[in-house]
Structure formats: C-alpha cells, structure tokens
Image (cartoon, helix red, strand yellow):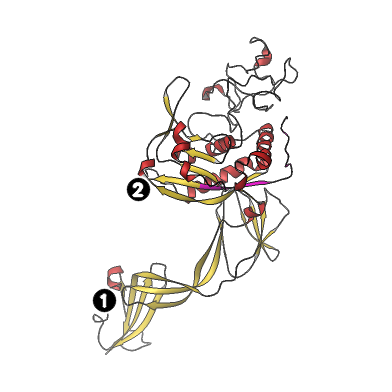
Amino acid sequence: MNYPDELVNVKHVYKVKFHIIRDNNGNRADFIGEDIVMNVIRDLNMSFYTGNIYFKYNGFEYIDDSNLRGNIPVISLLSTFSAYFQDRTTFHLFIINGQMTAYNNDGNLISVPGFGPRGGGVSFYSFEGITSRRVPSHEVGHNFGLRHNFSSSENAVRDENALGYNAEFVADRIHDKPACKIWSNNQFNSFGEYVGNDIDNNEALPANDSRRYYSQYRPKITNLMYIHEGGDLPINYQYTRGQFYALRHWISRDFTLSRLFYDASVSEVELYKPFESLMIGQNIVSITDNDNGTAEVCRNILIKDRYQKGFKMEFIEEDAFFLASTEYDLTEIISPIRNYFIKMIQINDEFLQKREVPCVRGTICETESYISGQIISTQILGSMNITIKELNEIEVKNPALFEELMNQYYHILKKMTSSGAVHQKVIYKP
C-alpha cells in the first residue's frame, strides 16, 4: 500500500465529547443520555482498535437552544455549530434535534443520518445516526480522511495482473477497497458481497473486459465506508487492511503537519483510567431524625470508579483476579481504600496498570425522605403481648404522630427512608 506510517508503533488515542441539542426547556422528541453515547464510544473502539486507534470518553453536555432545533441542511452544519467546536482538545460529536437534509443525485431532498467532514474532529448525527452501530464509525472514518467506496471518480484498476493496474496510485490509493458507482441493498449476496451488474471504474480497460467485474476484490456491504439503506444489519461492519493503512497515514501526517485534531490526542495510559470517579456513601454511620418527615443519613465514604465500554478488561487485586468485563459492559468498581490493577486485552494483554485509589476519610450525609414505618406497642418491655401498626408515607410523616400514640405504653417507632435506612427510637408515653 502506498501509505507510509511515520508513527508505526504509536497507539493513537483521542478524546471524544458529545453535544446533545434540546429546546430551551431541555426537551427533545427522543431522549439521549449517557447510555446511548457510551454505546457510540464502544462501537468506535471496536471498529478502530485493529489499527491501534482508540477513543477515550470525555463526557457529554446538553445544549438547550430552540434556535438549533429542526431540520438543518448539511451544508449549513459547520457554520451553525461553529461556536461549539473551537476547542480542538477533543473530538466533537453533535446530536441534532431534527434531521440533516441534503439533495441526492436525482435532485430529491433526503435526510442523512450522519455527516463527518474530511479532516478535523467534528461530526453530526440525527437520532437514527447516533443510535446506529456503523454510522459514527463511518463519519469518524471521514474525519480521518477515508472516502466512500462508491464513487464514479475512482478510476482505478485493482487487478494486479491486469493491464493498467494502478490502485495504489490513483483515487484514494486503497488497493483492497473496490469502488462501485451505486449502492443498493438487493445487489449483495448472503455474505455481503456485491453481485450487481455495476462494473469497477477501471476505465483503463474496455467496458466489456471481464476483469472490470471485480475479479480481484468485490465491494462488501460490511465495509464501514459503504452506505446502505435502513437500519443496522446483523453483520460485522469493519475496515479493510488498506483502509487502516490510509487511516494511520492520515493521522501520522496530522501529528507532523496539519495538526487538525492533534490536540485531541492523549496517552494510551488514559484508557486505563476511569472516565469518572465518584465518592459515594456505603455503610450507614448515623441517622438523625429531622422531625419534619426527613432524616439526615450519614455513610462511610467509598470510591466508585466507572470505566467506559469498548474493551475487554480484567481487574486484579493483590495478584488475585476479581472481575472481568466485556466490550459491552459499563464497569463500576466500588472500592474501599485499596489499590488494584487493570489489564486491557485489546491494548496489551500482558501489561498491568496500577490504579491508586485515593485515600478519602469521613462521611457523606444526605437528607432523605421517610417513605414508610412501623409502630410496635406494648405495656411492658420484653412482653410478647404487642401490637404492630404499619405506617404508609403520609402516616410516617404525620407531625401529630406522637399525640396519636396510646398512653401508658412503650412504643418502638421505626421510620424507613427512601434508601432503606431505618431510624428507630423507643418512646414511653405516660
């Protein structure tokens, strides 16, 4: 392949941030949150890791602006959203609140699920596009310089034994990615190989030459730079070896020349770090009744590390394996004050990266509402002669609860909060 990689041993890692467009009130017709965008990070990593290209989740934000709602022509996307992607330290994926429109070859206005300009780290998606397994990888492929594999301009001969062979030197110079002029779902066999009547665009040979009918490589519907109508198919979408050569060549030139998305790159060590670490409360230390239908519940602090989807991972503590995750898992590790090690199979199946859990002492206290309760009443403590009354949410919050208790009885009052914490006290009402 005519694509030298100047950084052949480098693992390229890029941060990715999502921007979700809503109206002024924070609404949109189709809800998009962490689960959907995390699946995109998963699919990007599963599509690109063969080429040692990876993506680090950099979070998402909501942009609440009704002026950005509605259908937007593809040619207007860059200018419409330019104020939001001046930062080059991350790839920016926008999920618009409507459809993206463009004219097809027949002059008809159609909607497209995604748009990724060649070069730079910005791409745009409809709801249909962002929830697809293939569309984000297709558009980010454009960001890295790849072209569609249907094109009337790819005038290349790909049969190495044919007169005029030139696939390594013309068009996009990818030998194993044949181009065809059109696409149609019904022109592929059950293996996803093109069997239609279109011919390869190798015009150096006569149109009736049999070598123009994909004698060397056939277009495949499984290729990520192909487009087919409808939703995802139950197939493995992927790039060819030649496309990965082209991807890495484009990236290596960006590192040394253009710097269009260079600033979004980070060390591979970042992939071993949780995308989010939270201090959470675990074991209850104390419960204080606020006498207003709520309680102050205090818990010991633990650290919860959250790891993005897209990798097979193993977690090890003191040489003992304790958890494995697949590419489809959003893994959460709740850890007391201890360290552990992480192995990421796709990156290096022998290397262990240490996760040093920060030492945080103290408690986390939150106000919680009571939701139920129970009163156990008896005239003599320890007696088996008792009455039990269950309290619903209204009753347990009743400020006149004490006045309603029976006189000359002991009462064990239990109040349960929304998290299951129970405040209990013994009351004697004379």
CA gap, disc 1 and disc 2: 40 Å
| Residue 80 position in % (x across, y down) | 43, 38
Amino acid bearing label 2 = Asn
Give the number of the mark in front: 1 or 2: 2
Residue at the spot 38% in from the left edge and 79% down from the top edge: 424
Callout 2 crowding tier (Cα within 10 Å): few <14, some 14–19, many ≥20: some
Q: Secondary structure at mark 1?
A: loop
Quadrant hosting residue 365: bottom left
Residue 90 location, x and y as percent? 56, 47
Amino acid identity at mark 1: Pro
Range drawn in magenta = 1-17
Q: Residue at x 25, y 83 (%)?
A: 406
Question: Count of labels shown?
Answer: 2
User: Between 171 and 31, which is closer to the camera in this rendering?
Assistant: 171
Q: Is residue 132 visible?
A: no
Does the magenta portion include 7? Answer: yes
**Disc 1 crowd, CA 10 A, few/some/many (<14, 14-19, 20+):** few
Which quadrant would the C terminus be assigned to in this image?
bottom left
Relative to residue 357, is residue 419 drawn left or right? left
Quadrant of residue 166 within the rendered picture:
top right
The correct choice, above or below, for 148 with respect to 328 in the image is: above
Q: Tag 2's secondary structure?
A: loop
Q: Which residue is mark 2?
A: 24
- Upstream in sequence: badge 1 or badge 2: 2
Q: Position of residue 49 (x, y in %)?
A: 65, 43
Percent of width and height locating residue 363: 49, 74
Q: Tell me if I can see residue 218 in this picture.
A: yes
